[in-house]
Image: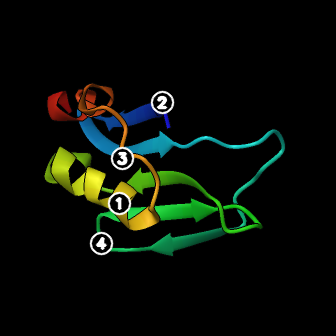
Amino acid sequence: MKTVSLQITYRKGKPFAAYIYLSRRNGQKSVRTEAISEDFLIDYAQDETPLGIEIVSPGMVSIDEIQAVFDRLRISRPPRIELEPLKAA
């Protein structure tokens, strides 16, 4: 994976949630969500391809913890710089 798309949602000026969009084919949609911890939810396509990682409390997790999720999913970690906006959140 070369890049990821990161979206951070704010409520009252504070980070509320974040979502990391992973590579997907046209038309793929989430059909199942799995909680892998209290901080992370994974969305999967029909063929069990991971489509995205939801970070429930972006201000409470480290970049190392996020990269560990990529390891668990057996997909390439994005460059740390792609996740740097989470540190500001």
Residue type at numbered disc 3:
Ala
What is the crowding at mark 1: few (fewer than 14 residues within 10 Å), some, or many (at least 20)? few
- Tell me the residue at 29%/33% (across/down): 83
Q: Is residue 38 above or below residue 40?
A: below
Residue type at numbered disc 4:
Glu
What is the crowding at mark 3: few (fewer than 14 residues within 10 Å), some, or many (at least 20)? some
Q: Is residue 84 above or below residue 16?
A: above
Q: Between disc 4 and disc 3, whose residue precedes?
A: 3
**Nearer mark to the viewer, of 1 and 3:** 1
Q: Secondary structure at mark 1?
A: helix
Q: Which residue is mark 4?
A: 38
The quarter in which the C terminus is drawn is top left
Q: Which residue is mark 2?
A: 2
Viewer-nearest residue: 26 or 33 = 26
Q: Which mark is residue 17?
A: 3
Residue type at numbered disc 2:
Lys
Where residue 35 sits: x, y (%)? 43, 74
C-alpha distance separating marks 3 and 2: 23 Å
Q: Between disc 4 and disc 2, whose residue precedes?
A: 2
Is 80 on the left-hand or right-hand side of 54?
left
What is the crowding at mark 4: few (fewer than 14 residues within 10 Å), some, or many (at least 20)? few
Q: Is residue 62 above or below residue 68?
A: above
**Nearer mark to the viewer, of 3 and 2:** 2
